[in-house]
Amino acid sequence: MRAIYLRELGSYFSSMIAYITVGLLLAVLGLVLWVFPDFSLLQTPFASINALFEIAPMIFIFLIPAFTMRTFAEERQAATLEILLTRPISPWKIVFGKYLATITWLFIALLPTIIYVISIYQLGSPPGNIDLGQIAASYLGLFFLGAVFCAVGVFASSLTANQIVAFVMAVFLCFLLYYGFYFMSKMASFTSGLDGIIESLGIDYHYHSISRGVIDTRDLMYFICLIGLCLTWTWVSIKKRN
Amino acid sequence: MAIEVSNLSKHFGSQVAVNDVSFQVGKGEILGFLGPNGAGKTTTMRMITGYLSSDTGEITINGTQVSEENHNIRASIGYLPENNPLYLDMYVREYLSYVARIYKIKHPKDRIKEVLGMTGLTSESHKLIRSLSKGYRQRVGLAQAILHDPEVLILDEPTSGLDPNQLVEIRQLIRTLGKEKTILLSTHIMQEVQALCDRVVIINNGLIVGDGNIQMLSDNLHNKYSVNVTFSRSVVDQTLSGIKGYETHESLGGNRYIITGTKDTLNESIFDFAISKNLKILEMSTNRDSVENIFQQLTNKIS
């Protein structure tokens, strides 16, 4: 598993993939938080970084599938998956090794955004007048949300040899999980009681629940189960060779 | 037996890819697996390596059955798939270290150095695989297959698409490896079989149509014995029938003939005939069945 993990990480950082994706995330967040007037923190009277946690999931919906689309699709396309599956390593370790590499990247991508938090911290009046506990919980929520998207992306990539197909499928699935259930729960036919259940199936519900600063094990279990489900499907999909 | 395949079958939907195939490869043998494209060579090899599972039948390697869970068996096989898939964005040495890590090879640095030397890659080891020529990429493919020192090597068309010089080099390398290892290699290039293999198994439409060494296969076909002769001057065709054991002949023009007849005595009687007619023989050679011939005859019989 270590071999797979290290190879994946190595390929992110020896090519431009990691630098471009992390750079893009920082650039978009930076523009929205500090430059574009609609969300700009400089225009609001409060030292709050909530906008970051509202915008980041939207960026992730596109960025993470773009990042994960190659994990298995590329190996299928190049037939290196065939050789990998004949080596003495279980498919489960291949899936897990690759997945760990993607969430390592996610962790590295989130690290530099702390600069924005520090900036807001300094801008408070007096400096430091900001709810750090809530920010920490929001980061945890964002990390789990990203980890689910990574698992979805890896799963979509395992289904096809075509990276574009993998990307489009992953974007759609992420969108469905994040917004789909939320919007569905607002449909008129569900307003009589089912809406709560449907809403709680979506990521949005649990993400905002953690973002409030309350770390509920139910929310964490939700994320972990979703990741487990996606990785199991991935495992099934690469075990079944076509 | 290093590899034993018995009654192996595999379907893809309604299409039968491999149909009741059985053969053995002895320890230290180089077996050529010959057949036209789409005959089922790759499918059979994929089943031996454990990439595909068989519908029916059994494969054992050194007496142990191949299965997905048995990692020891997998560690004793080196596999070079068709088209030699490689991670093009890795460096040669980096790729081999990755493979070494998967196989948990002890002292990976020494082993990589040794394999780089064996495959003649030492001077290319710092290069990106993408930047290598096809011949060198093939060497990388072989290097990854032998890195963990497997007993059995499965090579699927190891020389396809190489230029004549690269071909000779890779064959030389395979021959060297064959001294210590059991090799099953597939190909549709006949000269390769003649150059490399101790024995050949010919497969067509998923069925085995020939198994044995090249001489044996050719004898089994009951081909007519024929001789190419060039005389010093032209001969009246009818007089050729005076040759002892003569059956038919074919005139190629320019005093050249192909004469078919009884195997044991034909050469001698042509010589006697030439003396009696005051002819000189400028050239005489026996037509041997080439592997190509055998291959074509065996694979056309069925289709």
Image (spheres, rainbow, N blue to C red):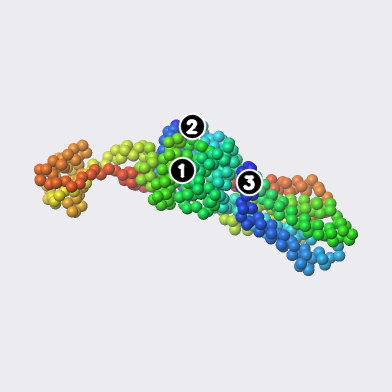
Q: Tell me the kind of residue under disc 2.
A: Asn
For the residues marked 3 and 1, what is the alpha-carbon distance in whole angstroms? 28 Å
Q: Please, what secondary structure does the residue beneath circle 3 have? A: helix
Point 71% across, 54% down: residue: A109
| Residue B195 horizontal/vertical position (percent) | 36, 42
Q: Confirm whether residue B117 shows in the render.
A: yes
Residue located beneath label 1 in the image: B155
Q: Tell me the kind of residue under disc 3.
A: Leu
Q: Around disc 3, counting alpha carbons within 10 Å, would you say few (fewer than 14), some (14 to 19), or many (20 or more)? A: some
Mark 1, chain letter? B
Q: Please, what secondary structure does the residue beneath circle 1 have? A: strand
Residue located beneath label 2 in the image: B62
- Nearest the eye: B278 or B69: B278
- Nearest the eye: A123 or B188: A123
Mark 2, chain letter? B
Q: In which quarter of the image is residue B219?
A: top left
| Residue B36 horizontal/vertical position (percent) | 39, 48
Which dot marks residue A6? 3
Q: Which of marks 1 and 2 is nearer the N terminus?
A: 2
Left or right: where A23 falls relative to B290: right
Point 58% across, 37% down: residue: B107
